[in-house]
Amino acid sequence: MHSCILILFCMVSYGRHRLHLPRLGWSGPVGKKLLLAKSRLTNFCFGEVPNMSENNARESILKSADAIADFVTAFRRDLHKHAEVAWTEFRTGSKVALDLLNLGGWEVKYGPSLYDKSLMMGMPPKEELERHAERGIAQGGDKEIIEAMRGGYTGVVATLKTGDGDGPVVGFRFDIDANDVEEAHDETHRPHREGFDSINPNADHACGHDCHTSIGLATAHVLYENRHLLPPGTVKLIFQTGEEGARGGKPMAAAGLADDCDYFMPIHMAQGDVGMNAISCSVSGQSNSIKSDVTFTGVPAHAGGSPETGKNALLAAANATINLYAISRHSKGISRVNVGVLQAGSGRNVIPSHAYMKMEVRGETKEIMEYMQKRAVEIIEGSAKMYDVNYTTVQTGESISAPSSPEMVDIIAKTAREIPEVNNVVLNRKGTGGGEDCTFFMLRVQERGGLSSIANIGTDSPAVAHNSYFDIDERSLVTGAKLVSLVALNALKRGKVR
Ligand SMILES: [Zn+2]
Ligand SMILES: [Zn+2]
């Protein structure tokens, strides 16, 4: 028994200090066996611990979450510094998977099996994916895990069985991607001052997904440490690729990752109306959206010598842009349209033969979104005809709205009130026009009789989301880990619902 305790101590120290095994090739036969053996050994050595009361479980979880503050902050800063945008989160995904494997206890999955390939939208070109995979390795990502993620399969799913596993399945979703934004690199921006601003060009965690990922991982540590205090069942952590541009949610939900969940809770940081030490238990009025890339193709010609033989793609795109913003508003609710990128032309004295546009429409309801999309397509088509050029459109993303299950809202609210530092529990937060693709998971869970609602974790930020000065108060990371871990405890306790 003594030697067992000694080995256990070494194993736990090993995990804590992140002395990883990549050089042993953990995903190869030897390394993988070592990790599995470690996980089994740890379980064996702990053995059965006497049942403790409900309060003890809660108090122990709160204590574990407080104790993990340094880890969760350091992990968040590391992800922030190495921000990766949708489908290119190779380093991020590999760091998450490796940490979970080293922790033990969790079954860890990654790679193509987590996706319905036919629904993967807005993928960067193959060469770009390859370049980012190499960059992920060069920046310290795990080479073997990244090999399995090539092609953009950067998500991770971890599952922990508690007790004999005979109980509900409680799922959580954490998005892991950064924004296509260049982060501020000046002294007024704390991440720059403290040396963790993004070193990757045009990639900035300006929506807080580095926080979500770190909270997910912190939860894995907290729940593993307290696994003997948890009622029987299964906890599932889904680390989702590409939420920005609404790209990863649909293909991962369609792969059935959350279909067995009795309870399901995605999280997002929130600032402004839900500030520091506040928790919101649902979000309503999130937009339905369709994202598209549009290409106009005309004919180049000498702008001075023979302009009449050219066909001007730039003018078609410019005309379409102006008129997209002129689509009439809808009497039944909020609508939005945006052209975020417009590039055209090849030279000063050449009639521009190519134009490229990245655009999106949004609607408060599916009906309004469909109205916006129909009018947008008509305007693009009309503009192309006007200038006698061709056009193509490719859908690159989609999000839909999903209702919250009232019982899940209750569970989140009850749980939030158990967290000492939380002083404001908001039952519902009115959406501000933003969209979320976790809704694809939520709807599938609800369709199968499960309960789901999105939780917002309040924080303070000097800037709005997607702004290059976005940052958070890192104390909210611990609050987030407490919320997720305690929702797992309370949902497991509540039992199956389907
Ligand atoms: Zn976000
Ligand atoms: Zn965002």
Image (spheres, rainbow, N blue to C red):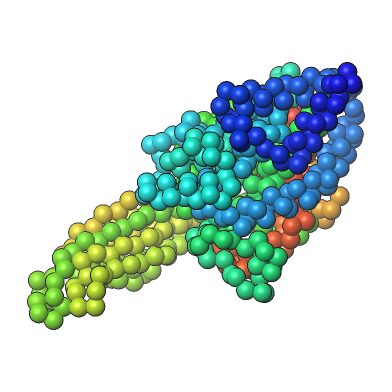
Residue 231 placement (x, y as % from top left): 78, 26
The front one of 342 and 374 is 342
Residue 357 placement (x, y as % from top left): 34, 62
The front one of 93 and 417 is 93
Note whether 475 is above or below 189 in the view shown.
above
Horizontal relation, residue 304 to residue 181: left or right: left
The front one of 186 and 267 is 186
**Residue lying at the far front of the rendered structure:** 23
Which residue is pictured at 9% across the width and 71% down the height? 309
Q: Can residue 170 be seen in this view?
A: no
Q: Tell how many labels.
A: 0
Horizontal relation, residue 160 to residue 6: left or right: left
Displayed quadrant of residue 163: top right
Residue 339 placement (x, y as % from top left): 39, 65
| The C terminus sits in image quarter | top right
| The N terminus sits in image quarter | top right
Which residue is pictured at 56% across the width and 51% down the height? 139
Q: Is residue 460 visible?
A: yes
**Residue lying at the far bottom of the rendered structure:** 304
Which residue is pictured at 73% across the width and 53% down the height? 73
Which residue is pictured at 39% across the width and 60% down the height? 359
Residue 246 placement (x, y as % from top left): 48, 50
Displayed quadrant of residue 388: bottom left
Horizontal relation, residue 10 to residue 113: left or right: right
